[in-house]
Amino acid sequence: MSNVIQFIVKDISVYRKQCRFINRNVNITNEYGERDSYPCIVLYECETGIPLLYTGFEKYVSSLVLSEIRDGETLAKRAVGVCNFLNYLLYETQINSLHECTITIIREYLKFSRLKDKDSGDLYKHDTWVRYRGFLFDFLSDYYNVNKNLLPFKYNGDDLQTYVKINDNNKSRPFLMKKNARFNVKGPRTTHKKNRILVKGYLDLLVFEAKKYEPEIVLAIALQAFAGLREGEVVNMTCGKLKIIRKQFAMVSTIELDLLEPAEFFVNWEKKTKPGSIKKNRIQKVYDGFIAQIIELYDSHIQVMESKGYETGNDCPLFVNYQGNAMTVQSYSGRVKKLFYDYFLPALKLTCEKQNTWADNAAFIETYEKEYPGAHMFRHWFTMYLITNAKLSIAEVMRWRGDSSQESMNSYIHENSELIEIYRESSYTFQSQLLDDII
């Protein structure tokens, strides 16, 4: 399907503005009986709500690598980004087909798309805008590659995206990183960056408190901080998906976390709270320096599970709620927040007073009191550790984080350059006996 839209009416320009491209998610059941939602990009008449054209453009939204096509929520976001561009073509240009689109039109759209609300003038956050630009370029590049021998294109897919081959140190397999064209269009300035700071030494204190008051989520915190898992990926872990790989003489060589498929207990989920999803299907490894800690925490976690009568078979959830059911993102995040404010923050204040380091940490404490950093702070901590302690290259950090976009990683490092220095210079250390002496 190559058409954007072709109307046979007297006043095409007027009628075009009475229509709109919209994504309608469609629930699909595969051969295994699993249900997921996939996008369907449809052109509607605004006044009547009548569908005028089923475009088929979703083919180029979902034609991604296997590791990315299973997350219906991600696909929906991509489809919305594509619809925004198609509506721009509909309202702001006179072209009728995608292959008529030029680099100039694409560049003008990038400038146009910086505004989130055209009436108020509100801007998108920088990282959101960069992400939507990537969605659009993926779509246009895929559309070009599939149809370039059939249609007279006015843009070239290679002008939108290029791939750079990176050879990491001590890695035999090169790493391909995708770079999106910029066309001299700067993204909007971020007006507010969410507080996700968890200074290096703070994690030790938080884990110490979690072992006492929230032992059932200590391992979950560690998987985020020591392997970079997202919250949705943590709750998709089953007892059998954490695999300790041993070599000769039973020595542990690595720990693999199987994130290739959503957990079976979340398939056909019908409860109101979202269970959590895997953003990128993959085998994730625990960073080498934290293997021993994960093994210790895993053994303790299984003991806690079994002592409370929870099943620990391969397909059973690794993390459960207070009722013994699979933990959702909402449940996990809520328990982390309670741990943070009820136990960690008071303990941090006490240790700072005991160590006479209040002045060095006051700014962070005051920030925490105003804004909660969220459970994503652990993945942020992992990233900062890889950059500042392990001193890995960008490609290596991306590999350990399970990322696919170099551009978002570059933006991440650029926007957090000052924070990187804070992590490097942080001198806070936690000694458990300090709290033992106080309490």
Image: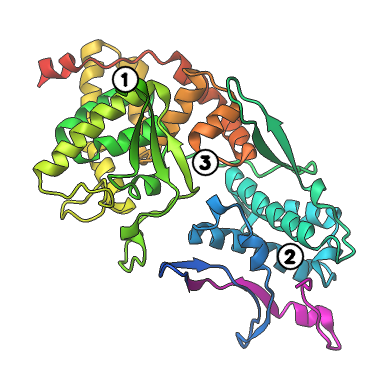
Left or right: residue 122 compared with residue 152 = left
For the point 41% across and 23% down, which residue is it?
A: 288
CB under 8 Å between discs 2 and 3? no
- In the image, residue 317 lies at what x, y percent? 26, 50
Mark 3 residue type? His
Q: Which mark is residue 88?
A: 2
- In the image, residue 44 lies at what x, y percent? 65, 80
For the point 77% across and 82% down, which residue is it?
A: 15
Q: Is residue 3 magenta?
A: yes
Mark 2 residue type? Tyr
| N-term mark: 2 or 1 | 2
Quick one: SS at disc 1? helix
310 or 49, which lies in front? Answer: 310
Quick one: SS at disc 2? helix
| Span colored in magenta | 1-28
340 or 53, which lies in front? Answer: 53
- In the image, residue 366 lies at what x, y percent? 34, 30
Q: Quarter holding the C terminus?
A: top left
- In the image, residue 35 lies at what x, y percent? 43, 68
Q: Which mark is residue 192?
A: 3
Left or right: residue 80 compared with residue 88 = left
For the point 33% across and 39% down, which residue is it?
A: 242
136 or 235, which lies in front? Answer: 235
Q: How many marks?
A: 3
Q: Nearer the viewer, mark 2 or mark 3?
A: 2
The quarter of the picture where residue 10 lies is bottom right
Q: Nearer the viewer, mark 3 or mark 1?
A: 1
Q: Is residue 104 magenta?
A: no
